[in-house]
DNA sequence: CGCATGTGCCGAACGTTGTTCGGCCGCGAG
DNA sequence: CTCGCGGCCGAACAACGTTCGGCACATGCG
């Protein structure tokens, strides 16, 4: 992970669909070199994939929320089962397994408040391992899609 | 946003770096048609960008946390100022503006616990508008990078 | 010090792709 | 029925991805 790799990664974070030649030119190497570096970055697991960023409203997810969930008992079986369950729900876009007073934080998107409420009542609260959850609506979501690498 | 648009979006969510021809073939139209559709989706703001998904450890973010923050007074000025401040910090990868008992949730990544602690103590707690914050470590982060669109 | 070995980069070549554009088809309005 | 329009197609050309042989530099060993 030298300076060249970092530069390539930065470019792909900024715009994953620009041509390999453009990236090569920006980072100052030949296209073939750039391609080989990129291939190795994928192979090493540094680059995990390339994804389009879609406006939530276009996917019928106009309302988003973070749901903090506590489950009991705190055994691996229960945690893994709930994690798999949550990840499988279509309204769920991300699952955080947490340390602290909340065991999970779930990022949920729904068409509107009514659908969100239905999701919480009909899906989540069904699960017997849940001993409590707290839902907070998201007003805004600023995501940094090209975070700079932190210095060592 | 007809069925063809949805199919293209789905493919670009799955893999943003596959060729336009491949996408066209999978969704069953000519490459030129697919390209034009994609261009319109970008123009309409449905597609907001294409980003590489990078392993956090490679960016020196081995430790991640969600920080719930309360600020006072709850005026637009204070909220906007804190939002801009948080988004500008290199350790911060996402800022959620929330409804509920927490005003913000900040997604933070740091090299290790020591750096995380330093960030919280030296950066966050500097801000006078903060009346309280709570930090929870993230053990795991399952993100769904190709969420299916919800039915209408 | 000279030489052998290996690693990483380059540039050329070729098959593939992106992108544009003219034209065709089907549909709806008049 | 005819006209106009929107959307899709296919061809063409420039640009790109990908592979491969070779070169230069560094490293370690005789």
Image (cartoon, coloured by chain):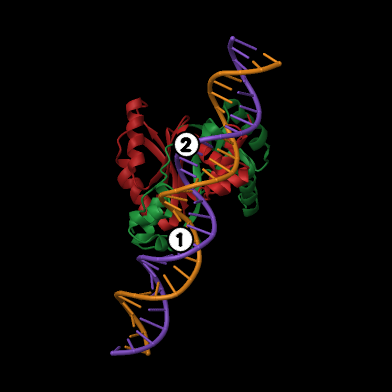
Chain colours: A red, B green, C orange, D purple
Give above or below for B126 relative to A53: above
Where residue B130 sits in the image (x, y, percent)? 63, 41
Kindly identify the residue that appears in the image at 32 percent across and 32 percent down.
A81
Could you say which is closer to the camera, residue B27 or residue A84?
A: B27
Give above or below for B96 relative to D11: above
Find out whether the residues at labels 2 and 1 contact each other: C-beta distance under 8 Å: no
- The secondary element bearing badge 2 is classed as helix
Mark 2 or mark 1, which is nearer to you?
A: 2
Residue A35 seen from this side: yes
Would you say C12 lies left or right of B46 here?
Answer: right
- The secondary element bearing badge 1 is classed as helix
> Where on the picture, by quarter, is residue A93?
top left
Residue beneath disc 1: B41
User: Of the numbered discs in the image, which one, if any, rests on residue B137?
Assistant: none
Residue beneath disc 2: A42
Could you say which is closer to the camera, residue B55 or residue A120?
A: B55
């Amino acid at each position: 992970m030298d300076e060249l790799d970092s530069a390539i990664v930065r470019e792909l974070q900024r715009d994953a669909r620009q041509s390999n030649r453009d990236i090569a030119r920006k980072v100052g190497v030949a296209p073939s070199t750039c391609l080989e570096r990129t291939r190795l970055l994928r192979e090493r697991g540094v680059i995990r994939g390339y994804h389009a960023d879609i406006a939530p409203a276009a996917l019928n997810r106009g309302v988003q929320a973070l749901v903090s969930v506590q489950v009991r008992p705190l055994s691996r079986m229960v945690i893994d089962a709930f994690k798999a369950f949550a990840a499988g729900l279509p309204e769920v876009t991300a699952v955080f397994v947490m340390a602290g007073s909340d065991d999970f934080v779930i990022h949920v998107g729904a068409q509107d408040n009514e659908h969100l409420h239905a999701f919480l009542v009909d899906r989540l609260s069904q699960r017997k391992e849940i001993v409590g959850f707290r839902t907070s609506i998201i007003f805004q979501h600023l995501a940094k899609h090209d975070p700079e690498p932190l210095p060592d």
